[in-house]
Image: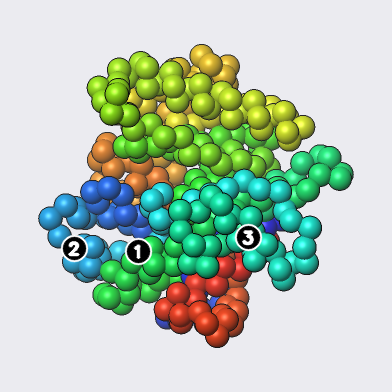
């Protein structure tokens, strides 16, 4: 089953070490900071060795990347960059009945009416979701599309300071990676990541991504001062409906555990989701659930979401072999959207 995500394979200095790198750095640009997490990957376990944040409010991203580089966090370690939600979109679709070699172009054609730009400007890829029990059902895909220019802009500050960028990833897969390191039922569990403007719900069944949905939480102009209780109830309702869809469509065992990521209203949202779903809902304290080096400082509360995504990206274990990009592809963007089985 394909469980990888977008890859942007570059001429990595870490290539040739054989197998996966023992240390990787996840990098995420949230609204105000760059967050980088250095994680050591051992057989069946991991540990967070270093965590760095840089304020981007009053400096360009290239300067912030250079500041991160000077901390030594990228020493002998490839980086995985997670795109911000504004740089890509996801679309759950049934797999078209076409030969595998034609699948991405068929998906591009299907997205022609929903993308806010020309489909020819998009890089399109997909993740195969956990199988449904219906023998004749079309395979479910989570299709991901990003404008080439947006990806280039996200990557450029890192390349400018020679950071060894191995892959470009998405938050859905970073959360999947993290979920697979947390305790809980292997039958099914979920993670609700929260940031300033959205909540990202990811569901894993037997370590495979089953469902992903982003829920907008930013208040509208009419509800600029939305009450926290109302916000929490609104998020809980969306989570409840999403879980009902998954249980109805999958035929698998019901969900048992849902983790709620860091947020100023984390406790309130956790309580509301538990009341709506009757699940075991737990506030995620990542420094309590994963091993951290003693030198890693306590996570700043306002950067908890960014740290969660950066750590999840660094937990990535899939490393497809490079492929030859089409002649028309800009070599700087040959991140080769080739997914492979885990």
Where does residue 339 sit, x and y in percent of width and height?
A: 62, 64
Q: Nearer the viewer, residue 67 or 184?
A: 67
Q: CA distance from mark 1 to mark 3?
A: 25 Å
Disc ID at residue 154: 1
Where does residue 137 sit, x and y in percent of width and height?
A: 81, 44
Q: Find numbered disc 3 in the image and state the secondary structure of the residue it sits on.
A: helix
The crowd level at tag 2 (other Cα within 10 Å; few <14, some 14-19, many 20+) is few
User: Which residue position is annotated with label 3?
Assistant: 109
Q: Residue furthest right?
A: 135
Q: Residue at x 77, y 41 (%)?
A: 132
Where does residue 123 sit, x and y in percent of width and height?
A: 52, 65
Q: Nearer the viewer, residue 301 or 251?
A: 251
Residue 274 versus residue 18 in the image, above or below: above
Q: Find numbered disc 1 in the image and state the secondary structure of the residue it sits on.
A: helix
Query: What colour scheme has been applied to the protein in the rendered image?
Result: rainbow
Residue 163 horizontal side relative to residue 45, left or right: left
Q: Tell me which label, 1 or 3, sits earlier in the chain.
A: 3
The crowd level at tag 3 (other Cα within 10 Å; few <14, some 14-19, many 20+) is few
User: Which residue position is annotated with label 2?
Assistant: 60
Residue 53 horizontal side relative to residue 47, left or right: left
Q: Quadrant of residue 204?
A: top right
The crowd level at tag 1 (other Cα within 10 Å; few <14, some 14-19, many 20+) is some
Q: Residue at x 32, y 71 (%)?
A: 156
Q: Tell me which label, 3 or 2, sits earlier in the chain.
A: 2
């Amino acid at each position: 089953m394909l469980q990888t995500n977008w890859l942007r394979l570059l001429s990595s200095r870490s290539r040739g070490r054989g197998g996966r790198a023992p240390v990787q750095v996840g990098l995420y640009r949230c609204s105000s900071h760059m967050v980088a997490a250095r994680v050591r990957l051992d057989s069946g376990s991991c540990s967070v060795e270093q965590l760095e944040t840089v304020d981007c409010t009053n400096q360009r991203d290239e300067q912030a990347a250079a500041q991160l580089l000077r901390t030594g966090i990228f020493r002998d370690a490839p980086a995985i960059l997670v795109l911000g939600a504004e740089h890509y979109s996801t679309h759950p679709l049934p797999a078209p009945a076409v030969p595998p070699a034609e699948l991405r172009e068929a998906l591009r054609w299907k997205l022609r009416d929903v993308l806010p730009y020309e489909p020819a400007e998009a890089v399109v890829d997909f993740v195969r979701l956990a199988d449904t029990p219906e023998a004749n059902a079309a395979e479910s895909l989570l299709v991901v599309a990003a404008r080439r220019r947006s990806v280039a802009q996200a990557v450029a500050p890192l390349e400018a300071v020679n950071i060894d960028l191995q892959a470009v990833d998405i938050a859905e897969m970073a959360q999947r990676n993290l979920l697979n390191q947390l305790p809980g039922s292997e039958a099914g569990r979920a993670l609700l990541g929260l940031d300033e403007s959205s909540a990202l719900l990811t569901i894993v069944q037997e370590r495979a991504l089953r469902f992903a949905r982003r829920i907008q939480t930013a208040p509208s102009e009419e509800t600029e001062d939305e009450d926290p209780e109302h916000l929490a109830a609104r998020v809980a309702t969306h989570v409840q409906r999403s879980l009902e869809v998954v249980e109805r469509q999958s035929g698998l065992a019901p969900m048992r555990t849902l983790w709620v990521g860091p947020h100023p209203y984390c406790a309130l949202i956790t309580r509301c989701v538990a009341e709506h779903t009757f699940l075991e809902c737990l506030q995620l304290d990542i420094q309590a659930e994963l091993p951290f080096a003693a030198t890693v400082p306590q996570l700043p509360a306002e950067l908890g979401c960014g740290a969660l995504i950066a750590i999840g990206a660094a937990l990535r274990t899939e490393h497809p072999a490079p492929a030859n990009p089409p002649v028309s592809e800009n070599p700087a963007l040959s991140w080769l959207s080739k997914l492979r089985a885990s």
